[in-house]
């Protein structure tokens, strides 16, 4: 028996098996990443709904929100702070959805729901929001506002 031939066949079989395992693991990692992104997006979407529920469950927050969406500038210092936190949280959820390549139509819809709520939201964005998010997201929200004003 030719031991060199057996050795070559064994090495080839080992190489093929290693390649098969690597391909399988690569497939599993891609699948796991997709599942992870889907889970994160679901949590972020739930977070947006939770912010809305919080606003309407708490009458004090409801009052602040309703006054803020009409005229952000007239809110007292404390109310403005609470309004800022509400909107910062809302837009942070949208930003994270946007960064995970979520369906563009849904991200745009979530952003426009808030942006079209009242002039106070636009004032908040101009005075506060645009200073706390990454540049690319600011450009994205500004593009929605530009589309809205046309």
Image (cartoon, rainbow, N blue to C red):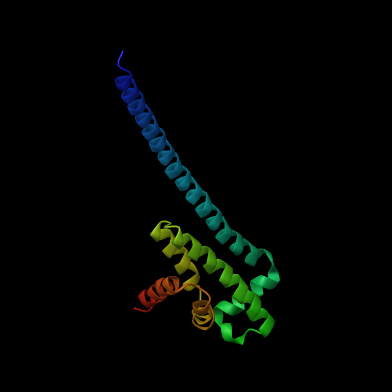
| Front in this rendered view, residue 110 or 17 | 17
Residue at 43 percent across and 72 percent down: it is 141
Residue 145 image offset from top left, x and y in percent: 41, 76
Q: Which residue is rendered at x = 46% and y = 47% of the image?
A: 33
Q: For the view shown, which residue lies furthest in the top direction?
A: 1
Seen in the picture, residue 44 relative to 83 is either above or below; the reply is above
Image spot of residue 15 (x, y percent): 36, 31
> Looking at the rendering, which quadrant does residue 8 occupy?
top left
Q: Nearer the viewer, residue 107 or 71?
A: 107
Quadrant in the picture for residue 52: bottom right
Q: How many marks?
A: 0
Residue lying at 42% horizontally and 44% vertically, measured from the top left: 30
The quadrant of the rendering that contains the C terminus is bottom left
Residue sticking out furthest to the bottom = 74
What residue is at 65 percent from the left and 64 percent from the top? 54
- In this rendering, would 150 be left or right of 67? left
In the picture provided, is 117 more to the left or to the right than 67? left
Task: Say left or right for 7 vs 94.
Answer: left
98 to the left or right of 6: right
Q: Quick one: quadrant of the N terminus? A: top left
Q: Position of residue 132 (x, y in %)?
A: 53, 76
Q: Position of residue 129 (x, y in %)?
A: 52, 77
Residue 79 higher or lower than 6, as above or below: below
Front residue (pair 82, 54): 82
Q: Is residue 132 above or below residue 31?
A: below
């Amino acid at each position: 028996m030719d031991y060199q031939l057996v050795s070559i066949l064994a090495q080839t079989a080992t190489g093929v098996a290693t390649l098969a395992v690597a391909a399988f693991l690569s497939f599993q990692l891609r699948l796991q990443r997709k599942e992870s992104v889907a889970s994160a997006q679901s949590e972020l979407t739930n977070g947006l709904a939770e912010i809305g529920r919080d606003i309407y469950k708490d009458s004090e927050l409801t009052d602040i929100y309703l006054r803020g969406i009409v005229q952000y500038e007239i809110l007292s210092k404390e109310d403005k702070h609470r309004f800022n936190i509400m909107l910062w949280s809302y837009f942070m959820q949208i930003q994270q959805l946007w960064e995970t390549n979520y369906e563009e139509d849904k991200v745009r819809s979530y952003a426009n729901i808030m942006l079209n709520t009242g002039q106070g939201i636009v004032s908040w964005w101009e005075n506060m929001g645009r200073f706390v998010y990454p540049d690319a997201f600011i450009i994205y929200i500004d593009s929605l506002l530009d589309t809205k004003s046309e």
